[in-house]
Amino acid sequence: MAGAFHLPFTVSLILVRLLNVDYGGDEMKQLNMSDYNMKAKVYWWVMVVLGAFAFIHSIADINSVSNWGWVRFAGLTTAVMLSSFFPIRIPGIPGSTGAVTASDTFIFLTVFLFGPAPATLLGAIDAFLGSYRTSKRVTSWIGGAAFMAVSVWLSSHLFYFIIHQYSGIKVETLVESSFGLNLPLIPIIVLMLSQYVFNTVIISVCLSLKAKQPFFRFWCDNCLMTFWIYFAGAVAAGLIYMAVLQLGFWYVLTSLPLIFVTYMTYKTHFEKVEEKQRRIEEKNKHIEEIGRLHMATVEALAIAIDAKDQTTHGHVRRVQLYTNELGKWLGASEDELKALAAASLLHDVGKLAVPDHILNKPGKLTDAEFERMKIHPTVGGDILKTVGFPYPVEPIVRHHHERWDGKGYPDGLSGEQIPLGARILSVVDCYDALRRDRPYRKGFTLDEARDYIKQRSGELFDPKVVNVFCERLEELEEMAAKLETEETSIDQAKATIPIKQGEIITSRSSDRPQPAREAEYLEHIKFAHQEVFALYEIAQTFSSTLDIDETLTIMAKRLDKVVPFTTCAVFLRNEERDQIRVVHVTGKNAELLEGSSLQPGSGVTGWVAVNAKPMYNTDPRLEFDALAPEIGEQYRAIAVFPLIKDERVLGALSLYSAELQRYTSDHIHLLETVARLTSDALYNAIVYEETKEDALTDRLTRLPNSRAFYMYFDQELSSARRTDMPLTVLGMDLDGLKQINDSFGHHIGDRLLVEVSRILQREFRESDVISRFAGDEFVALLPRTNRQQAAVLVERIQRAVDNLCLEVRMGKQARAGISIGIACFPEDGTRVEELLQVADRNMYEDKAERRWLRTRNMNVIHMTGHRAAN
């Protein structure tokens, strides 16, 4: 008996030691109950004292167990200990760990075979081991053991009390009774139910007090479905008890391998079920995340749309708050509430189709402007119809401007034909608009806006919605004020932390105030949106211009928002001159770098242009040694990207920074995108310029053609009329070009035309316009030039052309002259046709005179030679 008493005595000493545990003067950290409120603490200690009483009482009663009984009890204790460390997780038990062990079966079996005292000790040991396995807190270890001790002590004593009342015989174990194999069903059911109720209620009271939740709801949510665990344990215990009585204890032990195999089978099965359930939960979680992301995207779009209308800042957030609360009070379904949440954000999405000058007009809209404004619910509905929301968003947006009396738009619905969400949104949208200031009026007070809504109840608005809205209006206003205060505090926190463009914030000091940390991530989000918006702006603006200078100016301006630089230069490759020239530069040293050029392969940019590969974070001096050595020391980082289209290198985009040590991977990624967009836009601009040049330029002489002349003439004629200055037109025709073509070939004639065009370009001013009209005809436009000045120029041109001589072949030369006619505005005409006609007539007169002079000179030469011969 001494040995029999040793085990429970040792266990009691261990529990006493745990209750008085001391961890190096740290105030018993493991027994720290700081997360328990006072009620929970009192309850916990009361139950621990009761558990200690049950435990000690059981130790005193257990002395009556025989030595052979102790051996069997030790076997059951070992089984309980082993089962505690090998739980079977059963998925689908709400609020619990979903873990089941065979220990409940052994506890019930101990009640049958040994009575309440051993069962109480075994239950306490099982709970202690289970808590030890799942928690590191001594409070959980002690509490679990105490709670189980109380529940087993009560339920087992109640079981034997029912046995006594049932049979009239008082027994300490079921073995001592006369039931034999005919188990008393009612007492066993009472044992199972009482253990279920006592154990779950004791635990739920403690946890509900701790969590400050209603006990009954907590118990239903977390313990109701655990009934089947106790039921299965009681049934299994009854079957084993019958087998022990009929076959013997040791024979039952021989069946343990079969029990173990069965246990493993169930364990494997439930693990598979749990894995499947876990996947389903992950999928559902993913769906929820997608839903939240969807709504966040919707909110971002709505805020962007809200920002377009400068008079309604914050409108969508307030409307979302009001409609959500009003929908709950009016009993809207879950789908209707979700639809309201999305519709309140997107109800103005159709304003994308309304011009900004109407949205932001400071005065009252005209009838035509209001008609244009009225299209926004229809456009919004059409847009959202294509989205495919799983709840009815589109009808709410489409009909939120309908009226209760049927005089609204767009479809003239009336009464309850209008969706409930649209009726709610109509009231809220109008109220919020009334409360805000407009350029043409002050915002209404709360009472004024309420009276306005009430007066139009039954006319514009649903009376039921109006009544609920007006009754709870003060409450809604408080919610809106709280929301606005929170957003303002965030903005103020953001303002207290200056973040330089391109700076990455890495500080994680816990000493900083929470608003500051919040401002950090808000700034990062802001910059992220700036990047996306800047890229969008670049792409959008590129599509609207074909001018090279404008394209590069836009690119540099937008790029400065997302990638920091001190100097940005764009190089274009000139294949004819075999060089890479700066065509656009912005930032520091722009004047010095403007027009600079590099040889292919020279410097970083030259290498990039030749190899069609980017280079970045190298020594900037490699670039400036070839470009501008005197400024190379000013820069610390460089990034150069080729501008490529269809494997053709157009040039390079070069960024130089005096602040950054190096460009980050985010910068490089953005620059790759910008370079690609710039390449496409630049290629289109180059092709356009080439096409435009071909359309307005003579291919042979590269002078403007007749089409260009008419364009320039209109501009200069308007200027001459406006400033009352003279304007002269010269009509020019080459003499003898046909004979040269016939004698020497058209290629010689073309050479002559090119040389003449060079003479003309040399003799005329930069402000003059020289064009090739036809084969041997040229026309010049001379702003601010009178007839006398033009005559001096004509004489100089004719002398230069007359002196032109082309060596054709050995001993052969090609010469030509040029006849020129003058016409002046306004004396010779006020229209281009008139001036060209006069210039053409004067040119032919000049041609005839020059032909007569040539003929006379030839005759003089001939007569002089004849006389000399005589």
Image (cartoon, grey):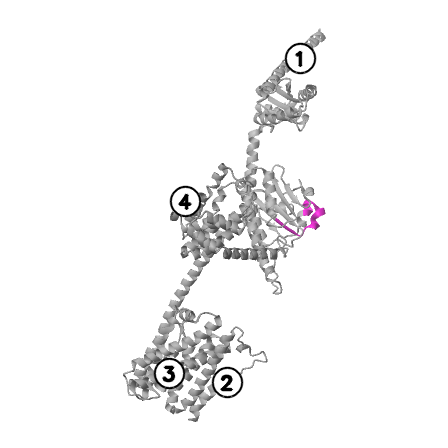
Q: Quadrant of the N terminus?
A: bottom left
Circle on res. 853: 1
Q: Determine the secondary structure under disc 2.
A: helix
Which region is colored magenta?
Answer: 624-639
Q: Earlier in the sequence, mark 3 or mark 2?
A: 2
Residue receiving disc 4? 405
Badge 1: few (under 14), some or many (20 or more) residues near its Cα, within 10 Å? few
In the image, what residue type sits under mark 2?
Val
Q: Amino acid at mark 4?
A: Asp
Separation of residues labelled 3 and 1 (CA atoms): 144 Å
Q: Residue at x 47, y 49 (%)?
A: 453
Location of residue 157 (image quadrant)? bottom left
- Between circles 3 and 4, the one closer to the viewer is 4
From this view, report whether residue 265 is shown above or below residue 806: below
Sequence-first tag of 3 and 1: 3
Q: How many marks?
A: 4
Q: Nearer the viewer, mark 1 or mark 2?
A: 2
Residue type at numbered disc 1: Leu
- Viewer-closest of 522 and 797: 522
Left or right, residue 103 beside residue 786 = left
Q: Which mark, by number, is residue 175?
A: none
Pick whichever of labels 2 and 4 is earlier in the sequence: 2
The alpha-carbon separation of the residues under discs 3 and 2 comes to 24 Å
Label 1: state its secondary structure. Answer: helix
Relative to the observer, which residue lies in front, 186 or 439? Answer: 439
Disc 3 designates what residue? 156
Is 635 colored magenta in this rendering? yes
Query: Is residue 585 left or right of 272 when viewed as pictured?
Result: right
The answer to whether residue 386 shows anywhere in this view is: no
Q: Is residue 575 above or below residue 669?
A: above
Q: Secondary structure at mark 4?
A: loop
Label 3 and label 4: CA atoms lie apart by 73 Å
